[in-house]
Image (tube, rainbow, N blue to C red):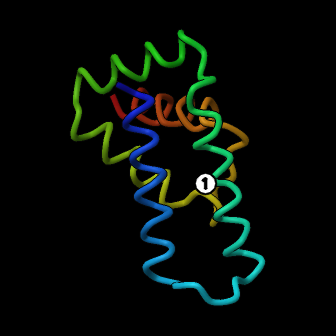
Amino acid sequence: MLSDILKVGIEKARDQFWDEHGFCDLTVEEHTRLVFLTKLKKSVDAIPGLFRYRAEELFAIDVTKTQGVLEEMIKQVGIDYFPDSATTLVTAMSQKLEARS
């Protein structure tokens, strides 16, 4: 479940990027955003079980809230948030949700 949600969210962000920018020359910042989104997508399947389990629990508690936080975080990837892996993203998302509880 979590893997699919993350992959779809990252693909959606990439699609929106291309819709906004087309196939023009990219700035360093735009290229960086694509690199980080690609890096995240490739690391989704490597999220350790405990982190995956906790995030899936949060989705089960409140899908709308969790989905909203995740979408906002993905929108910031490569702009002002630079997670080194999907595990880092999921950990930060879980911490944000737990802090709001």
Residue at 68% from the left image edge and 54% from the top image edge: 36
82 horizontally vs 95: left or right: right
Tell me residue 66's x, y (percent): 32, 37
43 horizontally vs 74: left or right: right
Amino acid marked by disc 1: Leu
Residue 48 appears in which quarter of the rendering?
top right
Image label count: 1
Q: Which secondary structure lies at badge 1?
A: helix
Tell me residue 44's x, y (percent): 57, 32
Residue at 53% from the left image edge and 17% from the top image edge: 51
63 horizontally vs 23: left or right: left
Residue 81 appears in which quarter of the rendering?
bottom right
The single residue placed furthest to the top in the displayed view is: 50
**Residue named by callout 1:** 37
Quarter of the image containing the N terminus? top left
Give the vertical position of 31 relative to 6 (above or below): below
Residue at 69% from the left image edge and 52% from the top image edge: 82
Tell me residue 83's x, y (percent): 67, 45
